[in-house]
Image (spheres, coloured by chain):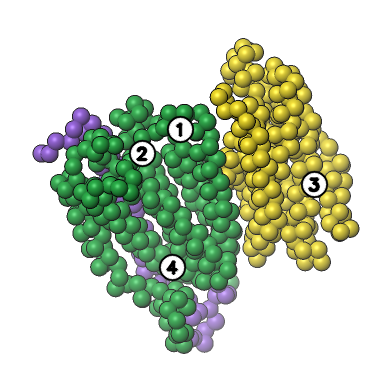
Chain colours: A yellow, B green, C purple
Amino acid sequence: MTAFLAVIGRDLRLAAKNEGEVLTLVLFFVSVGVIVPFAIGPDSETLRRLAPAIVWIAAFLSMLLGLDRLFRPDFEDGTLTLFRHARLPLPAIVGGKLIAHWLLTALPLVLATPILALLLSADLETFWRVVLSLLLGTPGLAALGAIGAGITVTLRRGGLIAPVLITPLAIPILIFGVATIAPPAGAAGSASAAGLFLAAISLLLCAITPFACALAITAGED
Amino acid sequence: MSIDSTVKGNWFSRIAHPGQFASWTRPVVLPMAIVTALLFAIAFWMAFFVSPAASENVGTTLRILYIHVPNAWLSQFVYAVMAASALGTLVWRHPMADVSMKAAAPLGATFTALALFTGSLWGRPTWGTYWEWDGRMTSTLVLLFIYLGIVALWRAFDDQLRAARIVAIFTLVGALNIPIVKFSVDWWSSLHQPTSVLRPDGPRMPANILTPLLVMTLAFTTLFLLLHLVRMRTEIRRRRLYTLERNRAAALEQRA
Amino acid sequence: MIDLGPHAIFIVWAYLGVAVVVAAAIAHTILDRMRVEKRLSILEAQGLRRRSDRPTSRPEGPAA
């Protein structure tokens, strides 16, 4: 257990040294929320209606942006090879890094949602639903991102292809994430159904990611 | 071509050697091509002369379905072939499995694109637009992107043998996610579109519609199997080519 | 010619498009094979062999 916590702690401490990275990601998240009104128009009624979608797209793009950071620094300085031969099984190490990744990428986004809610004229109840749906869905996004990162870590320019691979698979999260906040008119009660589906998908992805990732890393380094 | 003289018992491990596979499949290609051509000839004749011009459910666009349904079927079938090959690569380490995966991917993308193309042309007279975000078309679009991602992933690796296991993992992750995507897209489209979309006739199709459909599907499937086989054989030759080119480069380096 | 109905143009375009793409797929498959065979025959004419092809006392290149 201590080894597992040590993996998480290591990633957190490394990130603490470059806190600029976390802030950049949050800045990107907010930027997407800022530029969308420029594209759509300042009508606050429209923005309020589209706010769930905008927040989710911003979160999705931010997670895609951050996914390469998961394994590439370790790959480049050789830590990944050490991890492969560590006593702690590689899936456990990946699991630990996934938790750290979520804390460093998704949690800051959730904390930054008030800013977006303000910019997009969302009301308070919508805001809390946004937070809930992000909390339920970002683990799934992080897990998918980890799979993409694990698959492309040994490629020199792999960072470009991973988002392309991940995006189609992340569509269910996007669908249920937005529906948890604001189901379309005439579909009462489906918000909780959407939330349950979202949680189920996140759980499933988090369950398979450590093993799929470990396999991909091992295969890539051979 | 070098052939291993100690050939193992069952056929599955016998075709594992690329040289064996190549020599085993050489006599198959031409007969398969002839069968495919014949099936297409029969299927086309049936589609235009046996089938009625219209059906109750679908109307006069019925004939488009004869080439839409086989492509839609193939878009799923080819992925199943890829997923089975991926299992072969990861679980049984069968040497021909990754060749099969690599050969199937571009074909799957092509047939999926054709399914979208024919579906769009069917949709225009039926729904009035060339594109509707309905459950099936959207799922097929997502599937196309997954195929294209897999093709791109193959090309991103220099070493194709190392790529094989990684692509296999991604293919299986995709296989797991595709039902989830279909479910979520159906859920999503049923929320936003209360009107149901026209669907082709169910299993109680009359024989003069069902038969052309089945024959056409069979024709397309044999076409895929034929192209898949030929591309597998080409991939074997291509790997030999890369080995020779690498050897030549290394020999030149040694001399330098 | 048989009557294709009011939406004939769509039927025609659908069949044409499918025919073109299928022909292109077949052509690409064949041309790809021919290209690989051509390059292979050039290399083999230069006398290159894989290590497993023919046992020889002369040391060949490093292992593949």
Q: Is residue A219 left or right of residue A135?
A: left
First-in-chain label (1 vs 4): 1
Q: Nearer the viewer, residue C30 or A13?
A: A13
Callout 3 secondary element: helix
Marks 4 and 2, the one that precedes in the sequence: 2
Residue pictured at 61% horizontal, 22% vertical: A50
* Amino acid on which disc 1 is placed: Trp
Are the residues flagged by discs 1 and 3 in contact, CB closer than 8 Å? no
Mark carried by residue A100: 3
Specify the farthest residue to the left: C1
Q: Which residue is mark 4?
A: B236
Q: Hey, what amino acid is under mark 4?
A: Ile
Q: Quadrant of residue A44?
A: top right
Measure how far apart labels 2 and 3 are at the Cα level.
47 Å
The residue at which mark 2 appears reads as: B199
Instruction: Give the residue at x 36% y 69%.
Output: C41
- Amino acid found under the numbered disc labelled 2: Arg
Mark 1 belongs to chain: B
B60 horizontally vs A216: left or right = left
Residue topped by disc 1: B133
Chain holding disc 3: A
